Amino acid sequence: KRWIIPKGIIEPMMTPQTSAAQEALEEAGVEGKVLKDLMGTYTYQKWGGTCRVRVYLLKVETICIEWLEAPFRQRQWFSLDEAIKRIQEVEISQILKKLPVYLSNYQVESK
């Protein structure tokens, strides 16, 4: 019905990055390395309250054929420009627009 990025609650005894990797596996069936730096944050309303989401990037290394939420979710890959157009939440679009700069900074720091 609408395109989103995987998100969920930070599980007890997990770092935000480990929780992000777990959500990506459960919701999108992808595994890989979560980059350590926070890319951005946004909020949305759910369960009668405000949820604050921390966005981390995942360098996908494995794409699963079957995954936990596959019966409820469709996974699709888009170019960055197309993803920005399809995401309905303005805050996520704004985070995605920063991706090229974020990645260029990350690559410089990783060398």
Image (tube, rainbow, N blue to C red):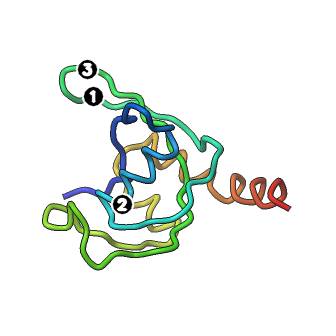
User: What residue sits right under mark 2 in the picture?
Assistant: 25
Q: Residue furthest top?
A: 49
Q: In the image, what residue occupies the spot 13% across and 66% down?
A: 71
Q: Amino acid at mark 2?
A: Leu
The answer to whether residue 78 is above or below residue 104 is below
Q: Position of residue 4 (x, y in %)?
A: 33, 53
Say left or right for 63 vs 18. Answer: left
Secondary structure category for the residue under label 3: strand
Farthest residue, direction bottom? 65
Find the distance from the CA under tag 2 to the CA under tag 1: 23 Å
Residue closest to the eye, 92 or 12 = 12
Residue 49's tag is 3
Find numbered disc 1 in the image and state the secondary structure of the residue it sits on: strand
Tell me the tag on residue 45.
Answer: 1
> Callout 1: few (<14), some (14-19), or many (20+) C-alpha neighbours within 10 Å?
few
Which mark is on residue 96?
A: none
Q: Of all residues shown, which one is farthest toward the front?
A: 13
Q: Position of residue 97 (x, y in %)?
A: 58, 53
The answer to whether the residues at label 3 and label 1 have Cβ atoms under 8 Å apart is yes
Which of the two marks, 2 or 1, is nearer to us in this view?
A: 2
Residue 9 placement, left or right of 38: left
Give the spatial CA distance, label 3 vs label 1: 6 Å
Circle 2 SS class: helix
Image quarter of residue 82: bottom left
For marks 3 and 2 on the same chain, the one whose residue lies earlier in the sequence = 2
Disc 3 marks which amino acid? Gly
Residue drawn 32% across and 22% down? 50
Is 49 placed left or right of 33 in the picture? Answer: left
Quadrant location, the N terminus:
bottom left
